[in-house]
Image (cartoon, grey):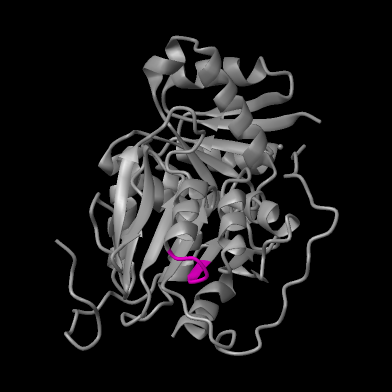
């Protein structure tokens, strides 16, 4: 079944080149193009495409406003194109909060070179997001209050193609109390990909400033985006959130986000856990990779890690969770209904590694119940 696409961009060159690349796939057909957000809103209602690609900076109506207007009438996956700058990252995060499901870097030079690899990435991403569910727009929490010494730790220096469905997914066991008898978590680790920026926002904004465990976050994201994402989360959350640096010490109430383009591991020597940031290995598909970070936590905190896998494409995190479980740690995964793409959490659940399968809206409260 062919996936229909509406391309919205103010660049005639980009509209033409993207249309050529997508139409050449045989499984994707561009049914319309628009040169600004207002045209995009009107054509989305008229053509009802399976996927919309959206630029963010356009005349008459910008891409973020257009996304909001389109999603008022119909839940359709929107793929944003973004520049690889801090400002581009900030605007892209605004677009994801408005309801876009994913983004790709907008690099005219690479597209103009007619790279077969880039063309494959573009086509595959369209097919992948065609089977996604636009997430509900989260409500913004009140502004983060000033820190007080007693309340927080000190600062530190495709027709839509559906994602594969499991034959049987185990039911989530009901929580039987604040935590399993004798269970103590030295660290909480969360891994996610597509849909993850908004999922993490929904989870982390529910945590109190005095959350007693360190948090490790792994989100598939370009190198130029993770600093902006960490800054955004820090401005919204009661806990502290920042991009991890090599040598950072894990502290209660501090969430460290793996830097894009690199790998992050945790070492626990002499009772003090530190972050190790390593160059991205070209042999690995994901940089950062959830499996790499989770695997290091399984070695550093056997039986004392709470690993959580949220929405995302693929199966990154499954093997890391397997290592955690082998050491006696606990694993949770997001349920299918609330996942933008049920890939990563499905892989964990289908492998029988999930101790609990939770709706996204329940994860934050359940973390408080289990850890505090």
**Can residue 305 be found in the magenta stretch?**
yes
Q: Is residue 355 left or right of residue 265?
A: right
Q: Is residue 48 left or right of residue 86?
A: right
Query: Looking at this rendering, what residue extends furthest in the left direction?
Result: 157
Q: Which quadrant: the N terminus?
A: top right
The image shows residue 314 at horizontal and vertical percentages of: 63, 43
Residue drawn at 45 percent across, 55 percent down: 197
Q: Which residues are magenta?
A: 301-306
Residue 43 seen in this snapshot: no
Total labels drawn: 0
Residue drawn at 43 percent across, 77 percent down: 206
Which of 90 and 305 lies nearest the eye of the viewer? 305
Residue 186 seen in this snapshot: yes
Query: Looking at this rendering, what residue extends furthest in the front direction?
Result: 270
Which of 25 and 262 lies nearest the eye of the viewer? 262
Name which quarter of the figure residue 236 lies in: bottom left
**Can residue 256 be found in the magenta stretch?**
no
Query: Looking at this rendering, what residue extends furthest in the right direction?
Result: 167
The image shows residue 203 at horizontal and vertical percentages of: 47, 69
Q: Is residue 363 above or below residue 80?
A: below
Which of 133 and 209 lies nearest the eye of the viewer? 209
Residue drawn at 18 percent across, 84 percent down: 148
Q: Majority secondary structure of the magenta segment? A: loop
Q: Is residue 180 above or below residue 33?
A: below
Q: Which quadrant: the C terminus?
A: bottom left
The image shows residue 165 at horizontal and vertical percentages of: 79, 50
Name which quarter of the figure residue 351 lies in: bottom right
């Amino acid at each position: 079944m062919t996936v229909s696409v509406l391309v919205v961009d103010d660049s005639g060159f980009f509209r033409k080149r993207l249309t050529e690349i997508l139409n050449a796939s045989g499984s994707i057909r561009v049914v319309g193009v628009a040169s600004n957000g207002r045209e995009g809103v009107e054509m989305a209602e008229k053509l009802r495409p399976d996927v919309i690609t959206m630029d963010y900076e356009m005349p008459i109506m910008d891409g973020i406003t257009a996304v909001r207007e389109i999603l008022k009438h119909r839940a359709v996956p929107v793929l944003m194109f973004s520049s690889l700058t801090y400002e581009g990252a900030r605007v892209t995060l605004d677009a994801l909060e408005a309801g876009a499901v994913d983004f790709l870097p907008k690099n005219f030079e690479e597209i103009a070179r007619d790279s077969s690899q880039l063309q494959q990435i573009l086509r595959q991403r369209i097919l992948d997001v065609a089977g996604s569910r636009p997430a509900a727009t989260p409500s913004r929490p009140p502004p983060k209050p000033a820190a007080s010494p007693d309340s927080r730790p000190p600062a530190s220096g495709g027709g839509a193609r559906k994602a594969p469905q499991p034959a049987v997914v185990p039911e989530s066991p009901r929580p039987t109390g604040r935590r399993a008898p004798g269970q103590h978590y030295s660290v909480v680790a969360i891994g996610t990909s597509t849909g993850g920026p908004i999922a993490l926002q929904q989870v982390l904004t529910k945590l109190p400033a005095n959350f007693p465990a360190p948090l490790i976050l792994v989100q598939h994201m370009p190198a130029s985006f993770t600093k902006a994402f960490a800054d955004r989360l820090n401005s919204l959350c009661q806990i502290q959130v920042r991009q991890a640096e090599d040598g950072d010490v894990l502290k209660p109430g501090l969430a460290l986000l793996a830097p894009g383009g690199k790998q992050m591991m945790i070492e626990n020597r002499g009772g003090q856990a530190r972050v190790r940031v390593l160059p991205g290995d070209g042999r690995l598909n994901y940089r950062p990779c959830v499996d790499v970070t989770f695997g290091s936590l399984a070695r550093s905190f056997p039986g004392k890690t709470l690993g959580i896998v949220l929405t995302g494409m693929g199966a990154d995190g499954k093997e890391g969770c397997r290592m955690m479980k082998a050491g006696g740690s606990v694993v949770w995964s997001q349920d299918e209904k609330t996942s933008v793409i049920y890939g990563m959490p499905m892989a964990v659940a289908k492998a029988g590694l999930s101790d609990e399968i939770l709706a996204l809206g329940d994860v934050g409260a359940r973390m408080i119940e289990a850890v505090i």
